Image (spheres, grey):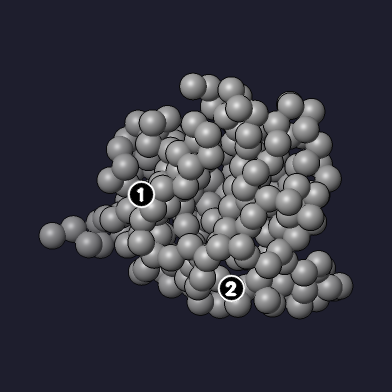
């Protein structure tokens, strides 16, 4: 089986959108329809892929702005955690705060994920959902165990962590998600975050200042 991933960094917050494809069936899914639905669609189309599923790690505007238009272009269903529905409903008004005009409406979810782990499959693509709240109440990370990589959204970054100063943010809950859900995945697991460059679990365990400080504070 052959999996290929294309990364597009888009929008006013330079957010990473991931197109993950099974190159044998040419079926693909999008993790975080950030912005510019036509570009996401064209990138997949030019590679010969058909987008069959749209996933969001969470409902903050910079991860779902293209959700409705991409769903209309592809007919693909849209999944998000139920706890982030309020972010979707509030999406147009978020634009007034950030750019001075209304954002487009978000896609209507076709399925609401919950806090229990499950496996989402599309061809050879197998994603395990990991509930990692803190940055957002319904934050989900997606783990490709066979490929040793995790799409961490805005939970864990290279040298940093997700913001918790936004509404419904919770620093202690975020750190618990990192320490109990992500770090145990293994040091050789690659981290594909919602912003900035890729990293590994091992690198963040050893060098991430937020991880090191939290570990120091909670050392038995």
Where 178 sits versus 168, above or below?
above
Please say if 210 is above or below 208.
below
**Disc 2: CA contacts within 10 A as few (<14), some (14-19) or many (>=20):** some
Q: Local crowd at mark 1 within 10 Å, few (<14), some, or many (≥20)?
A: many
Front: mark 2 or 1: 2
Q: Using residue 127 as the reference point, say whether residue 217 is left or right of it.
A: left
Identify the residue shown where x is 49% and y is 22%. 1
Give the quadrant of residue 220.
bottom left
Which of 165/176 is in front?
176
Relative to residue 120, is residue 105 depicted above or below? below
Q: Which of marks 2 and 1 is nearer the N terminus?
A: 2
Question: Is residue 66 visible in the rendered structure shown here?
Answer: no
x and y, in percent, of residue 104 in the image: 81, 67
Viewer-nearest residue: 83 or 122: 122
Q: Do the residues labelled 2 and 1 touch (CB within 8 Å)?
A: no
Residue at coordinates 83% horizontally, 73% vertically from top-left? 102
Q: Where is residue 199 in the image (x, y as percent from the top left)?
A: 47, 36
Q: Where is residue 143 drawn, in percent x and y?
A: 42, 43
Distance between the Cα atoms at labels 2 and 1?
A: 24 Å
Which label number is shown at residue 85? Answer: 2
Residue that carries the numbered disc 1 in the rendered image = 182
Element type where label 2 sits in the image = helix
Image point 48% across, 42% down: which residue? Answer: 121
* Rendered location of residue 8, percent (x, y): 70, 39
Query: Looking at the image, can residue 153 be seen?
Result: yes
């Amino acid at each position: 089986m052959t999996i290929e991933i294309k990364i597009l960094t888009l929008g006013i917050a330079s957010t990473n959108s991931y197109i993950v494809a099974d190159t044998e069936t040419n079926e693909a899914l999008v993790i975080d329809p950030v912005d510019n639905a036509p570009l996401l669609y064209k990138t997949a189309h030019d590679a010969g892929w058909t987008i069959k599923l749209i996933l969001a790690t969470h409902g903050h505007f910079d991860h779902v702005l293209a959700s409705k238009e991409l769903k209309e272009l592809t007919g693909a269903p849209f999944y998000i955690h139920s706890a982030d529905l309020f972010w979707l409903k509030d999406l147009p008004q978020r634009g007034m705060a950030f750019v001075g005009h209304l954002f487009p409406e978000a896609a209507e979810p076709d399925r609401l994920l919950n806090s229990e782990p499950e496996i989402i499959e599309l061809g050879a693509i197998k994603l395990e959902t990991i509930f990692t709240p803190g940055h957002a109440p319904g934050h989900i990370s997606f783990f490709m165990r066979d490929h040793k990589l995790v799409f961490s959204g805005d939970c864990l970054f290279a040298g940093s962590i997700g913001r918790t100063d936004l509404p419904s943010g919770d620093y202690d809950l975020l750190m618990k998600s990192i320490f109990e859900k992500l770090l145990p995945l293994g040091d050789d697991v690659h981290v594909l975050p919602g912003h900035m460059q890729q990293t590994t679990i091992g690198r963040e365990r050893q060098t991430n200042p937020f991880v090191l400080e939290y570990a120091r504070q909670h050392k038995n």
